[in-house]
Image: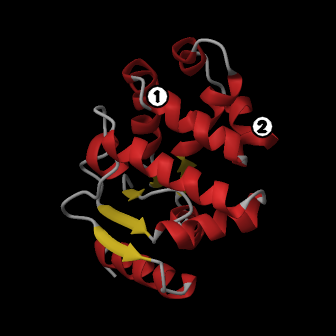
Amino acid sequence: MIFTVAIDGPAAAGKGTIARELAARFGLGHLDTGLLYRAVGAKGGDPVASARSLTEADLARPDLRSLEAGQAASRVAAIPEVRAALVDFQRAFARRPGGAVLDGRDIGTVICPEAEVKLYVTASPEVRARRRWLEVGGDPDRVLAEVRERDARDMARAEAPLRPAVDALLLDTTDMPVEVAVAAAVARVAAALGG
C-alpha cells in the first residue's frame, strides 16, 4: 500500500504528536521532516554540504529539540539548495510501501501535493510559545519572540512558504484538547483508507 499523510503547521502546534499517533494507530512509517533541517543546522559548516551528506545517525542527535536547533533549522530551510537536497529523501519516504506520515512545513504543498490526506495543525503564537517553554525552558518572553520570529521567516520565505494546502483539514489546537485533534485526524485517515 502506498498511502501518504501530510501534516503541516508552525512549531509547537501539535503536528508531531498527531503524526506519531497516526503512525502508531495505522502502522505507518513516520518522518519528522523538521529533524532533517534541525540536523543540517546543528551540523554547522556549509549547510548545502551538510544537507547532501545527511545520514540517519544525524537525525538521532540529542540536541535537535533545542531552541537553538529550531532557529538554525528555520534559517537553513530558507536556502533553496538545502531544500532541494532534502526533497528526494522526503518524497521517497512518503511513497514507501506500507504508507507514511510526514510532518513539517511544506509537506502538503510542495513535498507531497498528491498525499491522500493533508492536515494543517496550528495554534496561537502565545499557546505555542508556552508549550515550547514548558518543553525547553528559558525566558518565556524570549521564547514567544522566537516563535513569532520563526513564524514570520517560515511564512515569508520565497521557497516553499508555510501555508495550508487548499485541501487540508485545519486543526486549530489553541483551545482544542489533544485527544480531540487526534480523533479528528484519525477519522480523516480512516475515511481515506475506506473505513
Quadrant in which the N terminus is drawn? bottom left
Q: Position of residue 120 (x, y in %)?
A: 36, 64
Quadrant in the picture for residue 43: top right
Rendered view: 108 above or below 167: above
Q: Image point 64% across, 56% down: which residue?
A: 143
Tell me which amino acid carries mark 2.
Arg
Q: Is residue 22 visible?
A: no
Residue plotted at (62% across, 23% down): 54
Query: Vertically, is 175 above or below 171?
Result: below
| Amino acid tagged 1 | Leu
From the viewer's side, name the closer residue of 153 and 172.
153
Give residue 61's mark: 2
| Circle 1 SS class | helix
Query: Residue 86 got which mark?
Result: 1
Looking at the rendered structure, the secondary structure element under dot 2 is loop
Q: Nearer the viewer, residue 10 or 138?
A: 138
In x, y percent, where is residue 50? 60, 17
Left or right side of 146 for 174: left
Mark 2 nearby-residue class (10 Å; few <14, some 14–19, many ≥20): some
User: Is residue 9 left or right of 170 when viewed as pictured?
Assistant: right
In percent of width and height, residue 113 lies at 25, 48
- Determine the CA span between mark 1 and mark 2: 18 Å
Residue 162 in the image, given as x and y percentages of width and height:
35, 49
Labelled pair 1, 2 in contact (Cβ < 8 Å)? no
Indicate the quadrant where residue 193 lies.
bottom left
